[in-house]
C-alpha cells in the first residue's frame, strides 16, 4: 500500500499548484538538438580559433629530466608549445590536481606534461606526438588490496558522510545469530564516458591591464568552475565567465574542474586574444577526468530464526590518489536500508599513484548497494524466505542510524507493486531448474535508494517581465541531457500562474544568478525552489499582473526539515535473465524499476532518466571494467572497442514507473531527485537473477561468462 506524507509547506513559500508540473511535455530544446543548432562547448561560434592537443606522461611516477620541443615548435602551423618550463604561473597549489604544467613532478600515468597549440587540431596532434620527454622513473604503487598495511580512515567522505558508524556489538551478534552471511564483494574501476567528451574553449582578453577569461565549457555547474578556477589563477571570480547552455552528459565527471580547463586557460593566456579549443579524445577520457573507484566490500549479516536481522556490518576498502583525496561514500546506503540493533559501517582508503577518482552516477550507493543487496539475497536464501518477504521483515519504522522518522519511505510499496507487475508472485525459489531450450532462466530483485543531501549553499533565481506579459527566468542551472530546460520551465510556469509558452528560461551561464550544480540528484529541487521563491517575491511586490520591467530575485529557502526527518528516494529493481548452459553467456530479457521519487515534474523526462540509469546499471553488471596495467599505470581498454558499455542488443524489455508520492518536507514542488536512483540496485538484481538461473553466486563485477560456468561433472 502506498503511504504518502503531505507535510506542511517548506519555509518561504506555498505549495505549487500543479498545472504544467506533471505534464509529459516534449523537451523544449529537442528540435535545436536534433537539428544541430544547440551549441555545445566545441561548437560555440568564436573567431579565428586555435586548437590544443596535450602531451601526456608515459610513466606513472617520476620526474621530467628533459623535454625536447624543437621539432614540435618548428612544425608549420604551431603557435605555441607549453611545458612546465614556460607555462604561465598559477597562484595556488591547494588543489594539486589542478596544478598543471607547474613542476617537473609526474604523479600518475596520463598526467598533462605539455601542450601544443596550433592552427588546426590535426597539426596540434601531430606536433604533440613529436615532443620528446625524458623521465627519471620511480617505482609506482598501483595495486588496491584489502590486506594492505597502509589503509587509513579518511577525514572527509563524499557528501559529508561519516567515515565510520557503529551501534551495539556486531561481533557478538554474529556469534549468536541463527543464520549468518559473511562475504566479500568487489566492483572494478569504471569510467564515466558521457557522449560529449570533456571540452573547453578558452578566450583570454586583456582590457586596461586586467585579464578576463571566458570559457565555453562542458560542465555540470558554472559556479563551481568559475570559483575554483579563480582560486587557481588568483583572480576575482567576476573576471571569469563560464558558458555552457548545453552539455552532452556528465554522470558526475563534469561536476568539478579538471586539468583540461586549466591548461586551456594557460594556453589562452599565451596566445592572448585568440580562443583555444581543447576537446579530449575518447582515449584521453580514461586518464585524468575521473572514474569510479574500485571497491572491496565485506558484508556481514546475522539474523534470528525468524529471519529478522540482528547485525549488519559493511566495511569498505577503496582507492584514492596520492595528490588529492577522494573518498566515495560506498557504505552510506547501508545506514538506512534495514533494521538491525547491531550495526557498523567503515571506509578505508589506499592512496596510490593513480589519477584522482571522482563522482560517477550515484557515487557510493551504486557499488555499495550491489554488495548489500547481493548479501540480502544470500541471506534470504539462507533463511528460506522469499527475498521480498525477507526485506519486509526487516523494514525499519525510523532511520536505523539517525533515529529520525522518514519524510516518506515507500520501499515496500515499490516492492509490492513491482512484484505484481513483474509476475514475481508464485516464483519457484529453487535455482537452476527453469529452462527455455538451452538457456537457464532466473529472476532477481533488489532495492534502490538515494539520499536527499543537505544543501551547501542556496541557489538564486531572477525573474524579469518583458514583451507584454512574458517572463524571463534566469538561473545558473545546467542541463546535462536530463531535461532541465523543460522541467524548470514547467516549474516557473506554475509558480507564476502562466502558460508554459509565456516563460523564457536562461541557464548555463555564470553571469546569471548563482546556483548549485547538477549533481546529487539535487538540481531540479534546488533550482525549482529558487524559481518558486523568485515568483513569490515578484507577486508580492508587483501583484498578479506585473508590468514590463518588473523584476525580482529569490533563493532556496532555509532547509526547515534538516535534522528533523530522514530524506531518501527508494525503489525496487526486478530482473529476468537467461544464461546459456554451455557457454555462460548471460542475457537480460526483462528489467522493471518501480520508484518513490516524490512528485514527478515531467513524466517523459523522468522515465528517460530512470531507464537511462537502469541501462547504466545493466552495463555495470555485465560489461564495464577499466583494466589497469599494474606495470605501467594506464587503463589498457581505453576506448569503446574494448571498454564495453550496454548497447541496444543488450537492452530488451525495460521499463520504469513510480508510485503516487508527494514529499513536501524539502521543496514546494513535493519532488525528490531522480537522476541517480535508476542505477542503484540494478546490478544486484541482475546478479541475483543470475544466481537464481544457475545456482552460481557472482560477487565480483562484471558478470562474465567464465564466472557462471559450472564445474565439469
Image: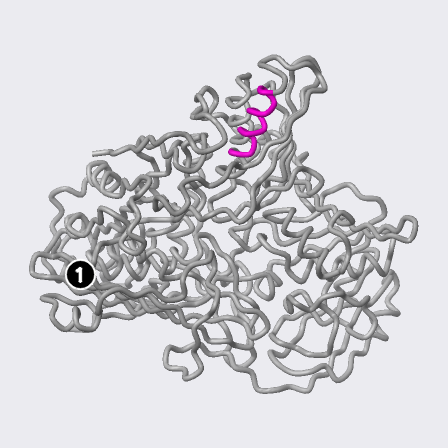
The answer to whether 174 is drawn above or below residue 331 in the figure is: below
Which residues make up the magenta segment? 529-540
Residue in the foreground of this view, choosing between 316 and 193? 316
| Foreground residue among 102 and 187 | 102
Pick whichever, 19 or 679, lies toward us: 19
Residue sticking out furthest to the right: 208
Is 467 placed left or right of 256 in the picture?
Answer: right
Query: Considering only vertical position in the picture, is 512 above or below 191?
Result: above
Q: Is residue 41 left or right of residue 535?
A: right
Which residue does the image show at 74% across and 42% down from the upper left? 44
Quickly name the residue at label 1. Answer: 379
- State whether the magenta stretch is mostly helix, strand or loop: helix
Secondary structure state at the residue bearing disc 1: helix
Q: How many marks?
A: 1
Point 56% across, 46% down: residue: 457
Q: Quadrant of the N terminus?
A: top left
Question: In this figure, which colouring scheme has been used for the structure?
Answer: one colour
186 left or right, relative to 439: right
Above or below for 311 versus 453: below
Residue 264: x %, y % from top left: 75, 58
Within the image, what quadrant is residue 152 found in?
bottom left
Crowd band around label 1 with a 10 angstrom C-alpha radius: few (<14), some (14–19), many (20+): many
Whether residue 698 can be seen here: no
The residue depicted at 24 percent of the width and 62 percent of the height is 375
Which x, y percent locates residue 372?
28, 60
Image quarter (top left, top right, bottom left or bottom right) of the C terminus: bottom left
User: Residue 409 sits in which quadrant?
Assistant: top left
Residue 393 vertical position relative to residue 86 in the rendered view, above or below: above
Residue 472 position, x and y percent, is: 65, 25
Q: Quadrant of residue 60?
A: bottom right
Q: Was residue 534 drawn as part of the magenta stretch in this picture?
A: yes
Q: Is residue 24 visible from the viewing direction of this image? A: yes
Amino acid at each position: 500500500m502506498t503511504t504518502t506524507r503531505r507535510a506542511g509547506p517548506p519555509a518561504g513559500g506555498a505549495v505549487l499548484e500543479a498545472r504544467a508540473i506533471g505534464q509529459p511535455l516534449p523537451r523544449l530544446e529537442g528540435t535545436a538538438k536534433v537539428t544541430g543548432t544547440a551549441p555545445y562547448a566545441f561548437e560555440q561560434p568564436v573567431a579565428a580559433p586555435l586548437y590544443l592537443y596535450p602531451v601526456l606522461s608515459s610513466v606513472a611516477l617520476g620526474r621530467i629530466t628533459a623535454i625536447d620541443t624543437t621539432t614540435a615548435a618548428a612544425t608549420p602551423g604551431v603557435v605555441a608549445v607549453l611545458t612546465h618550463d614556460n607555462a604561465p604561473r598559477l597562484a595556488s597549489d591547494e588543489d594539486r590536481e589542478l596544478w598543471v604544467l607547474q613542476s617537473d613532478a609526474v604523479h600518475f600515468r596520463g598526467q598533462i606534461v605539455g601542450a601544443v597549440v596550433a592552427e588546426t587540431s590535426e597539426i596540434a596532434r601531430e606536433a604533440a606526438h613529436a615532443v620528446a620527454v625524458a623521465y627519471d622513473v620511480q617505482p609506482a604503487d598501483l595495486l588496491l588490496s584489502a590486506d594492505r598495511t597502509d589503509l587509513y580512515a579518511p577525514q572527509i567522505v563524499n557528501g559529508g558522510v561519516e567515515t565510520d558508524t557503529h551501534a551495539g556489538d556486531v561481533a557478538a551478534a554474529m556469534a549468536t545469530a541463527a543464520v549468518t552471511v559473511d562475504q566479500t564483494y568487489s566492483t572494478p574501476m569504471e569510467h564515466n564516458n558521457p557522449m560529449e567528451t570533456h571540452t573547453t574553449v578558452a578566450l583570454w582578453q586583456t582590457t586596461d591591464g586586467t585579464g578576463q577569461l571566458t570559457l565555453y565549457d562542458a560542465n555540470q555547474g558554472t559556479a563551481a568552475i568559475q570559483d575554483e578556477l579563480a582560486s587557481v589563477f588568483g583572480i576575482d571570480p567576476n573576471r571569469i565567465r563560464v558558458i555552457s547552455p548545453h552539455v552532452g552528459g556528465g554522470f558526475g565527471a563534469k561536476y568539478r574542474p579538471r586539468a583540461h580547463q586549466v591548461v586551456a586557460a594557460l594556453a589562452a593566456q599565451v596566445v592572448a586574444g585568440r580562443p583555444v579549443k581543447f576537446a579530449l579524445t575518447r582515449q584521453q577520457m580514461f586518464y585524468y577526468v575521473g572514474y569510479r573507484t574500485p571497491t572491496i566490500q565485506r558484508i556481514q549479516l546475522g539474523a534470528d530464526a525468524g529471519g529478522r536481522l540482528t547485525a549488519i556490518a559493511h566495511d569498505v576498502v577503496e582507492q584514492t590518489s596520492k595528490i588529492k583525496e577522494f573518498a566515495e561514500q560506498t557504505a552510506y546506503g547501508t545506514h538506512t536500508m534495514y533494521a538491525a540493533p547491531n550495526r557498523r559501517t567503515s571506509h578505508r582508503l589506499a592512496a596510490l599513484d593513480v589519477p584522482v577518482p571522482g563522482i560517477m552516477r550515484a557515487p557510493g550507493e551504486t557499488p555499495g548497494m550491489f554488495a548489500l543487496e547481493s548479501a540480502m539475497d544470500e541471506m534470504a536464501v539462507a533463511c528460506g524466505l522469499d527475498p521480498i518477504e525477507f526485506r519486509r521483515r526487516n523494514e525499519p519504522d525510523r532511520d536505523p542510524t539517525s533515529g529520525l522518522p522518514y519524510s516518506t519511505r515507500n520501499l515496500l510499496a515499490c516492492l509490492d507493486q513491482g512484484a505484481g507487475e513483474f509476475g514475481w508472485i508464485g516464483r519457484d525459489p529453487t535455482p537452476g531448474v527453469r529452462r527455455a531450450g538451452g538457456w537457464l532462466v532466473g529472476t532477481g530483485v533488489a532495492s534502490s535508494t538515494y539520499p536527499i543531501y543537505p544543501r551547501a549553499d542556496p541557489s538564486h533565481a531572477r525573474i524579469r517581465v518583458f514583451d507584454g506579459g512574458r517572463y524571463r527566468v534566469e538561473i545558473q542551472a545546467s542541463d546535462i541531457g536530463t531535461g532541465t530546460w523543460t522541467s524548470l520551465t514547467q516549474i516557473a510556469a506554475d509558480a507564476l500562474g502562466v502558460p508554459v509558452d509565456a516563460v523564457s528560461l536562461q541557464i548555463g551561464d555564470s553571469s546569471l544568478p548563482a546556483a548549485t550544480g547538477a549533481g546529487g540528484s539535487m538540481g531540479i529541487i534546488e533550482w525549482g525552489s529558487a524559481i518558486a521563491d523568485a515568483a513569490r517575491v515578484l507577486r508580492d511586490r508587483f501583484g498578479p499582473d506585473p508590468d514590463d520591467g518588473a523584476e525580482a530575485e529569490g533563493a532556496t529557502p532555509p532547509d526547515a526539515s534538516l535534522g528533523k526527518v530522514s530524506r531518501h528516494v527508494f525503489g525496487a529493481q526486478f530482473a529476468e535473465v537467461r544464461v546459456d548452459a554451455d557457454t555462460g553467456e548471460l542475457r537480460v530479457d526483462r528489467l522493471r524499476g518501480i520508484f518513490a521519487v516524490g512528485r514527478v515534474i515531467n513524466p517523459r523526462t523522468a522515465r528517460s532518466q530512470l531507464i537511462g540509469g537502469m541501462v547504466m546499471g545493466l552495463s555495470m553488471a555485465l560489461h564495464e571494467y577499466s583494466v589497469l596495467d599494474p606495470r605501467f599505470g594506464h587503463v589498457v581498454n581505453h576506448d569503446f572497442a574494448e571498454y564495453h558499455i550496454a548497447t541496444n542488443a543488450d537492452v530488451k524489455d525495460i521499463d520504469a514507473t513510480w508510485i503516487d508520492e508527494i514529499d513536501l518536507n524539502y521543496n514546494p514542488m513535493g519532488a525528490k531527485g531522480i537522476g541517480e536512483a535508476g542505477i542503484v540496485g540494478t546490478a544486484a538484481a541482475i546478479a541475483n537473477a543470475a544466481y537464481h538461473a544457475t545456482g552460481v553466486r557472482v560477487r565480483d563485477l562484471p558478470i562474465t561468462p567464465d564466472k557462471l560456468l559450472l564445474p565439469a561433472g
